[in-house]
Image: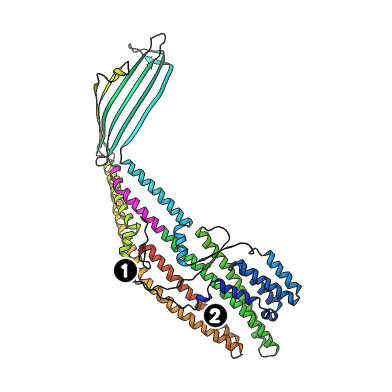
Amino acid sequence: MKTQTQSKTSSPRWRTSGATMSHRRLEAENLIGARNFNRLSDRSFIARLNQFCRFNEYVGPEVLHQGLFKFVKVLASNGSRMFIFLFLLCYFVSPNIKAQDTYRLTLPEVTEIARSKSPDAVLAKTRLNNNYWRFRSFQADLRPQIQLDATLPNLNRSIESITLPDGNEDFISRSLMRNSLGVSLSQPIVATGGQVFLSTGLRRLDIFKNDFNDGSISYLSTPVSLGFVQPLRTFNQLKWNKKIEPIRYEEQQRSFNEEKEIAAAESARLFFDLLIAQLNFEATANNKANADTLYSISQGRFGVGRIAETDLLQIELSVMNANAAYAQATLNAQTANEALRRFLGLTGNVIFELVPPADIPNVVVDESLAMEYANRYRSEILAYERRLLEAEANVDRAVKSNGFQVDVNGQFGLSGTSQSFSNAYSDLIDQEVFSLGVSVPIADFGKARSRIEVARSNRELEQLNVTQERISLERRVRLQVQQFDLLRNQVDLADRAYEVSRRGEEITRKRYLIGKISVTELNLAVSSMDSARSQYFSALRNFWLGYYELRRLTLYDFIGGEALVVE
């Protein structure tokens, strides 16, 4: 079955009150309206002034400065020196009045920055580069190696103990110099674990003149020498590496793709943490302003005896709760903003203006297709194969490292010697070297057998673990696919519930303003709307986090219809 993608536009009702510059500008202007100023008590005005001074955390400085000058005009017209002093103090002391970089980002833009430029992505790229050079080093082990060996010079002027022909020893002064130069070419044999080599070299011996001899110069040439080293019945590490290392390298490439998706999923989580914090900040600011307005109206009603003192105290308590909620929302927004900035690796005083996801995609994901992508792109699939090969290699090592061992070495070449360089390559003679080494353990009291059985037991255990992990991966993928549809349905339900609660709160507030209902019913309506709003954004958050988890498990973008792999 093919993946079907269809864009489904959610209700724009909540997006118009999102974390946008125009919305914040309107709220800032409402805070400094002359009518509101004249009706506020001293305590409410100070709270309103403090709220406005903090608005630049989420809007640009130009909006803040415009509002500040309007505040000065309103304050000056009322002749309140105390308020002017408080205002100027807030303006010049506030640490928020400084240059800020505002980033207006959508969810795809945040995740793309996380996948390509975040510190986690840079670390993943560095690990991939290290793994690449490790694989190149392994490939070089399979190729011929050319080596130059030289000793230029080796001078010896000393008195040494020499064994004489009659068996006695005497101290004799020696004065000589040795020089040697050689080039060798070696090639490992993967199939047998042996090695063949070809070499050529030249040696020169200078014996300096002294009281015992007249001095001499001699040469030893080896124009060509061909040899081999072949262990028999020995563990062949190179043979197993040739099977394992290519799988390991491809596994690490897939791990790099997975780490990028892990970074994308984490950035999506931080995106919604900040988005919800900003929307909560807006909601608490509105609730705070509404609470202040209701408190002013209720004071007038209490003065004419239309409400009881208990109702006034309850409204005053609501004002205090609104102030506390606003302060906490401000702190949460700042903390979430810093967490996202740090994760994306951005420097400086950065403020994010996040754009909520515009659409809820109606994507139908087939379980079998998701499993196919997981088996094709996940690193665990190759890790299972690698681990089984490593278990087999450990058994082979245990069997061949204990018991009968044979080493065969052979070398054939031509060599010549003379006191002149030109004659050193004349009259060459054969040079043959052959050796056979045998190692046979006589008694180890079961040590070798124990090691072999341990290796075989570990192989069986690894096979069981791999089987269980395969089943677990399949279950995770299928469960994530099933939950994906449920999460989308929950968003639709929560959206409708939020719309109903919002309309109910508007109606209830209007009825309270005309004195039809009590403050208790109003508080219940506000509480119900806040709860529905929280549930809606929680459902929206869970949907997108579930989608990015599905991307991480399959390394496939079901919305874009492309694999999330880098070859």
> Majority secondary structure of the magenta segment?
helix
Quarter-of-image position of residue 304:
bottom right
Instruction: Return the x and y of residue 480 as percentages of the image width and height.
Output: 37, 68
Binning the other alpha carbons within 10 Å of mark 1 as few (below 14), some (14 to 19) or many (20 upward) gives some
In what quadrant of the picture does the N terminus appear? bottom left
Outermost residue, top direction? 211
Please give the label number shown on residue 367.
1
- Residue at the (69%, 64%) spot, across then down: 92
Q: Amino acid at mark 2?
A: Ser
In what quadrant of the picture does the C terminus appear? bottom left
- Residue at the (73%, 71%) spot, across then down: 84
- Residue at the (41%, 22%) spot, across then down: 154
Binning the other alpha carbons within 10 Å of mark 2 as few (below 14), some (14 to 19) or many (20 upward) gives some
Which span is picked out in magenta?
234-259
Please give the label number shown on residue 166.
none
Q: Is residue 492 above or below residue 424?
A: below
Which callout, 1 or 2, points at the residue further toward the start of the chain? 1
Q: Would residue 483 appear left or right of 331 to someone viewing this image?
A: left
**Which residue does the numbered mark 2 point to in the structure image?**
527
